[in-house]
């Protein structure tokens, strides 16, 4: 059986939730599946980590691209290859170029690890819908127009959707998700919470949806002993000083980072402690509001941003932190929760969406819409050593239920059941 995978997100240099899911799932499938043949479809040549799916360390001869756009991939069973699908525009690669590839020569199964199924696709298509937060929280998502010439893209969008949608980021998310739920043979989602949300808003039959939880990088994050010199070096590289609290993820409205800044200021004032707060991740929709609050509260020396950080350095940041704070308003899963628990970092998180399902009793939860509650819980974690130790122990036990290998095996079971 030939399984095609949209690897465009997995191939991005700066990864967050959906990109890490795509990347690690591909790597895990390469390790466990020797029977099927895989084609990775991408818009750009594969980066080193994807053109070499083996565990070998050192130079690899993968990466050569022939005239047909095929790129060699080193994998444990030699059953992976890549097809580079060039596209002249920044937008609509999935609906344009990937659709054309499906028309001229589709695989037996197409797997799209994100929400957008191409217009043309094989009958056996599987799509992962991570969440549908845009249905519940419309204002937390970007409504910017897509494309350098919005009028042209807008005309195309309205033509394709019979006037229902325009070429905006929000409309594309809404249209592509709804279409995938309708057209795909099977849907994978990453939590029971997301499955219930999908059924609520789209009335998708329960038998069409499988819940497959995410995993985390065990080798990087689950280390009982860490080299303190490496931790200090990583912190110094990003300008991080102990003691500190931190958040990792996109700096955006959906993640509720603005409320975190307010709660931190309140908690620090009441608690009298000196921890700084570091915001780790790329700026996204709503970042201007976050910057405004930092300046408004005059805490630019206490609340600092680092930009995107590699996973290796991120693991050291977890190990050096007093606590990890996850204030999200809506989350389909929350991979950082697993990373923190594996690293032995106490977790303070919002009582929202899928967070309680994933964290279980291994996190101190607060109401994401109540800054007072958030501040109170931050104070408790900073001042409560016994509480931190309890959460660390609970987290290390809880995280044993998740792995990328388990995710890959359950995903492969979905493919084999089509």
Image (tube, rainbow, N blue to C red):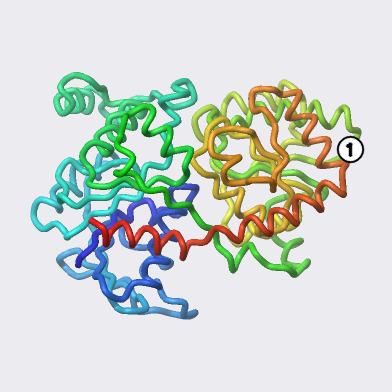
Q: Residue at 72% of width from left, 66% of height from top?
A: 230
Q: Residue at 40% of width from left, 71% of height from top?
A: 53
Q: Quadrant of the N terminus?
A: bottom left
Pinpoint residue 332: horizontal percent, then vertical percent: 48, 40
Rendered image quadrant of residue 276: top right
Pinpoint residue 97: horizontal percent, then vertical percent: 18, 47
Q: Is residue 381 above or below residue 341?
A: above
Q: Residue at 69% of width from left, 59% of height from top?
A: 396
Rendered image quadrant of residue 179: top left
Q: Quadrant of the C terminus?
A: bottom left
- Helix, strand, or loop for circle 1? loop
> Left or right: 243 with respect to 415?
right
Q: Is residue 136 visible?
A: yes
Q: List the single residue furthest toward the right.
A: 272
Which one is in front, 282 or 379?
Answer: 379
Which one is in front, 61 or 79?
Answer: 79
- Residue that mark 1 sits on: 273
Pinpoint residue 304: horizontal percent, then vertical percent: 70, 39
> Left or right: 79 with respect to 220?
left
Which one is in front, 411 or 324?
Answer: 411
């Amino acid at each position: 059986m030939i399984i095609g995978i949209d690897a465009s997100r997995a191939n991005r240099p700066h990864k967050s939730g959906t990109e890490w899911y795509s990347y690690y799932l591909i790597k895990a499938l390469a390790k466990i599946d020797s029977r099927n043949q895989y084609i990775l479809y991408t818009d750009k040549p594969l980066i080193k980590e994807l053109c070499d799916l083996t565990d070998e360390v050192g130079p690899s001869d993968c990466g050569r691209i022939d005239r047909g756009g095929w790129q060699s991939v080193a994998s444990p069973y030699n059953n992976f290859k890549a097809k580079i699908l060039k596209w002249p525009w920044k937008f609509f690669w999935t609906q344009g170029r990937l659709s054309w590839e499906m028309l001229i020569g589709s695989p037996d199964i197409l797997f799209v690890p994100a929400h957008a199924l191409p217009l043309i696709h094989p009958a056996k298509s599987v799509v992962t819908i991570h969440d549908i937060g845009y249905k519940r929280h419309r204002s937390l998502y970007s409504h910017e127009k897509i494309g350098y010439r919005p009028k042209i893209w807008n005309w195309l969008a309205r033509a394709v959707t019979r006037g229902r949608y325009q070429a905006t980021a929000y409309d594309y998310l809404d249209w592509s998700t709804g279409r995938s739920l309708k057209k795909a043979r099977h849907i994978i989602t990453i939590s029971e919470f997301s499955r219930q949300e999908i059924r609520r808003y789209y009335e998708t039959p329960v038998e069409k949806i499988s819940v497959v939880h995410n995993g985390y990088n065990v080798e990087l994050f689950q280390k009982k002993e860490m080299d303190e010199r490496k931790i200090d070096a990583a912190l110094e590289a990003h300008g991080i000083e102990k003691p500190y609290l931190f958040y990792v993820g996109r700096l955006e409205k959906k993640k509720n980072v603005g409320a975190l800044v307010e709660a931190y200021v309140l908690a620090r004032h009441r608690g009298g402690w000196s921890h700084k707060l570091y915001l780790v991740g790329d700026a996204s929709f709503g970042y201007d509001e976050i910057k405004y609050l930092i300046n408004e509260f005059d805490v630019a020396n206490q609340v600092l941003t680092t930009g995107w950080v590699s996973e290796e350095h991120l693991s050291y940041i977890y190990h050096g932190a007093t606590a990890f704070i996850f204030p999200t308003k809506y989350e389909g899963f929350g991979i950082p929760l697993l990373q923190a628990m594996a690293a032995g970092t106490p977790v303070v998180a919002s009582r929202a969406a899928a967070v309680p399902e994933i964290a279980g009793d291994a996190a101190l939860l607060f109401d994401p819409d109540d800054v007072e509650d958030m501040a109170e819980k931050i104070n408790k974690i900073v001042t409560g050593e016994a509480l931190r130790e309890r959460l660390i122990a609970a987290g290390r036990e809880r995280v044993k239920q998740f792995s990328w290998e388990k995710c890959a095996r359950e995903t492969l079971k979905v493919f084999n059941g089509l």
